[in-house]
Amino acid sequence: MMGTADIQSRKKGAILGMFIGDALAMPVHWYYDRQALYRDYGRVTGYQAPRNPHPDSILWRSVYNGAADILHDQRKYWGEHGIHYHQFLKAGENTLNLKLCALLIDALVENGAYDSDAYLERYIDFMITPGRHQDTYVEEYHRHFFTNYANGKAPRSCGVVEKHISGIIGMIPLIVYYAEDPDTARRLAFQHLRLTHLGDRMTAAGNLLVDILLPVLSGASLKDTLVDKIKRQDNPLLGFSFFRWLEEPDEAVIGRRLSSACYVEDALPAIIYLALKYHHDAARGLIANTNLGGDNAGRGAVLGALLGAANGSQAFPKPWVDGLRHPSANLDLLKQKGKE
């Protein structure tokens, strides 16, 4: 049996890992040219600030014409070439998706339980109020949500069929909060996912995350849990040669065998591969992920949660923990049982 302190360390590790994995990758987020990544930042092993130009930026072709203003003073950069997606963030700061995780954690602590309507109120207020964040990039799911919202749809009906790995990040605080009540954890994590991300691909990704993270939070070995899941082949995202790939360089697996892009059908298997390979070394795993480029911030948040849950909060270097700029102020979330 695992003691309470160990369980709390795993829960704290999952939350810290989520923020750390995102912040570490943020300056080199969506670099697909790894030579350009190393040229501009070197091998990333700690927090850095982003800088322009971003050679792989496609912000110039991103579009949002919705009536609800969610771009605010960042709108003028959309359509421009070479703009870094997170150009105004500082070293150790998190992207918009993780700031919304902090918003969710704050809501959980203040309300004492998950209330999807209360979260939606906070989410809408956060996104339409100028100055709440300084991130230049606003992902597609936000744009779809607020297009629907401005067109008069009820907030609960504004989500769309989605495919991006960022969608399952928001499930992590709920899985952690309700970890001692697995049925509730699964139900509410999916309730939250479906506010913004619908469709079979997101359901498969969410199920795989819950099936791995819950037992690890309860004391199971991450490696054993992954091996068991891969052998069972009970999820469509597991149909890859993970064990054979362990003998190959990371750069050969992610980028050649699996795309480094943000779609769940490649991004989540990439996370499984990295979690299996670095199950015992959270820092090495997150450094490897960061330097692989692509959607390393989205992958990093999920991978960080898995590695943190497996190894506890002490697994991360102190400068990484201390260097986070805006983690939730309410990490007391971890001290609550989260029973409904």
Image (cartoon, rainbow, N blue to C red):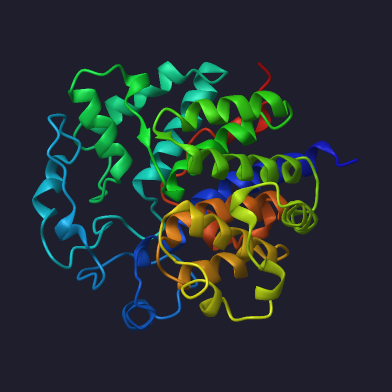
Residue lying at 47% horizontally and 67% vertically, measured from the top left:
290
Total label count?
A: 0
Residue lying at 14% horizontally and 39% vertically, measured from the top left:
72
In front of the other: 59 or 326: 59
Question: Quadrant of the image for the N terminus?
Answer: top right
Quadrant housing residue 147: top left
Residue lying at 16% horizontally and 29% vertically, measured from the top left:
68
Residue 121 picture location, percent across and down: 34, 20
| 174 in relation to 52, above or below | above
Judge whether residue 121 can be spotted in this image.
Answer: no
In the picture, measured across the screen, residue 191 lies left or right of residue 78, that is right
In the picture, measured across the screen, residue 24 lies left or right of residue 219, that is left
Question: Quadrant of the image for the C terminus?
Answer: top right
Residue 249 picture location, percent across and down: 59, 81
Residue 303 picture location, percent across and down: 57, 56
| 291 in relation to 193, above or below | below
Quadrant housing residue 174: top right
| 122 in relation to 297, above or below | above
